Image: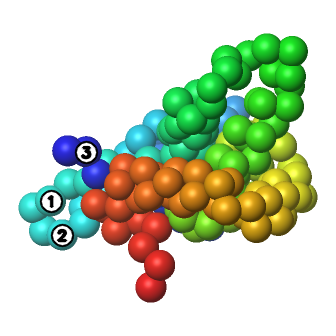
Amino acid sequence: MHQFIVSHRPSPTKTAPPAGMAPETKGLEPEDDGPRLRQRTPGQVVPVVLPAVACRIVRQLVLEMTAMASDRPLWRRDSRRSTCHVRQIAMYVCHVVLRLSQADIGVAFGRDRTTVGHACNRVEDRRDDVAFDAFVSAIERVVLSVFGPAGIGSHE
């Protein structure tokens, strides 16, 4: 079983370029776009999942669970609305369960952090409906089962 850890890194700061970099690349940061390995305990290596990758995984989980729960195809005349609802639920779950910042979620979804805040508020307001609340709770449990073994998302 794979264990995922979402890295909570501070925003990049300006540092001196590593030794061996060409002079014309001074001031540029090396690309950091893939999973990295991190020592969790001596002898145990755990893969680190970037927030963008975690958000993509959560979005796909929400999309699959929505398709399973729905009695009609998702991509019909109201495909834009369905896509928006899936994205809003995924943003909400990323923020509440995985505890990612709204800025990180916004970057991952190609939206602004204020849009993420709006999505979280919309989903929270819709949770007054018992059926919708049960659906979002099921999604939260699935996301916890995927990311939970690594200690992410546990409400302490």
Instruction: Report, in whole angstroms, how far the alpha carbon at label 3 lies from the one at label 1.
Output: 13 Å
Residue found at the far bottom of this picture = 156
Q: At 81% across and 21% down in the image, what residue appears?
A: 79
Residue 71 position in % (x across, y down): 63, 26
Quarter of the figure with the N terminus: top left
Quarter of the figure with the C terminus: bottom left
Looking at this view, is 72 or 3 the one in front?
72
Other-residue count near label 3 (Cα within 10 Å), few / some / many at <14 / 14–19 / ≥20: few
Looking at this view, is 123 or 91 the one in front?
123
Secondary structure at numbered mark 3: loop
Q: Which residue is mark 3?
A: 2
Q: Is residue 40 visible?
A: yes
Residue found at the far top of this picture = 76
Q: Is residue 55 left or right of residue 83?
A: left
Instruction: Report, in whole angstroms, how far the alpha carbon at label 1 lies from the one at label 2.
Output: 5 Å
Q: Is residue 20 above or below residue 47?
A: above
Give the residue type that dot 3 points to: His
Residue 44 numbered tag: 1
Q: Which residue is mark 2?
A: 41
Residue 119 position in % (x across, y down): 82, 54
Look at discs 3 and 1 and give the one toward the viewer. Answer: 3
Q: Are marks 3 and 1 in contact (CB under 8 Å)?
A: no
Q: Are marks 1 and 2 in contact (CB under 8 Å)?
A: yes
